[in-house]
């Protein structure tokens, strides 16, 4: 009896241990460029996301270089541009935590900065957050989002989109993007719980 209960508890403990670990599956500091991210110049005006290495202009709370969609740099009339991550392999994971340092300086003319993700190679996007007021990571700290993926999901992408309807001094900056992932906690814990209970029931039957 005691041995069975101990085995049961060990199974639960093993389940908890297996599921507690999270892997860092993607990081980007933008310190040496925008890496293998892609840019989408949706308004096709030739001005879009770029790398900036001027520390004194990094308002995200990050360090070194950063990615920016900077209305002031372009003198463009409007902005509609996205910074899109490479495809990140999430095979075997269903819990994702995305974190980033963000700075968005909102202009009186309107506009927004948003973050969204895709699990179908960029065909559809699910919003995580949209800012329509100034938010600066140097004051607010990094931002993070928890996502539960459907079983069988393999591809994960992030998009940082900037819309600005008129010329502005302001900009959307991104730094220190990180994706943490952990493996399928619920089904494995349930399986272990089931195995433990089955063993316990078997012992009870033998005792009867
Ligand atoms: Ca950086
Ligand atoms: Ca553009």
Image: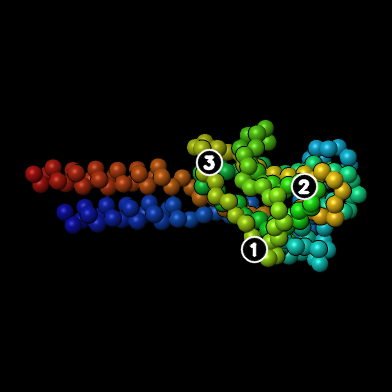
| Residue 41 placement: quadrant | top right
Colour convention:
rainbow
Question: How far across and down, in percent of the image, does residue 122 sit?
Answer: 68, 36
Do callouts 1 and 2 mark residues in contact (Cβ within 8 Å)?
Answer: no
Q: Is 142 positioned to the left or the right of 164 in the image?
A: left
Instruction: Check disc 2 and report the residue beneath it.
Output: 110
Do callouts 2 and 3 mark residues in contact (Cβ within 8 Å)?
Answer: no
Q: What element carries label 2?
A: loop
Camera-side residue of 70 and 85: 70
Labelled disc at residue 141:
1
Between disc 1 and disc 2, the foreground one is: 2
Which comes sooner in the sequence, label 1 or label 2? 2
Q: What element carries label 3?
A: loop
Which comes sooner in the sequence, label 1 or label 3? 1
Q: How far apart are marks 2 and 3 (CA)?
A: 33 Å
Camera-side residue of 155 and 84: 84
Residue displayed at 73% across by 47% down: 112
Q: Quadrant of the N terminus?
A: bottom left
* Residue 38 visible from this viewpoint: no
Instruction: Check disc 3 and report the residue beneath it.
Output: 149
* Furthest residue in direction top, as rendered: 123
């Amino acid at each position: 009896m005691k041995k069975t209960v101990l085995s049961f508890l060990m199974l639960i403990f093993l389940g908890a241990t297996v599921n507690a670990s999270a892997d860092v599956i993607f990081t980007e500091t933008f310190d040496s460029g925008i890496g293998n991210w892609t840019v989408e110049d949706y308004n096709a005006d030739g001005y879009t996301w770029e790398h900036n290495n001027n520390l004194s202009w990094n308002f995200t709370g990050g360090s070194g270089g950063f990615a920016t969609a900077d209305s002031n740099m372009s003198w463009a009339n409007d902005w509609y541009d996205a910074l899109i991550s490479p495809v990140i392999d999430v095979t075997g994971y269903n819990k994702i935590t995305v974190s980033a340092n963000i700075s968005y300086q909102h202009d009186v003319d309107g506009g927004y900065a948003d973050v969204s993700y895709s699990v179908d190679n960029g065909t559809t996007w699910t919003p995580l957050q949209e800012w329509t007021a100034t938010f600066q990571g140097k004051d607010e700290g990094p931002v993070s989002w928890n996502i539960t993926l459907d079983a069988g999901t393999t591809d994960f992408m992030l998009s940082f989109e900037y819309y600005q309807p008129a010329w502005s001094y302001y900009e959307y900056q991104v730094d220190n993007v990180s994706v943490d992932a952990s493996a399928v906690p619920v089904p494995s814990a349930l399986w272990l719980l089931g195995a433990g209970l089955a063993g316990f029931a078997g012992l009870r039957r033998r005792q009867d």
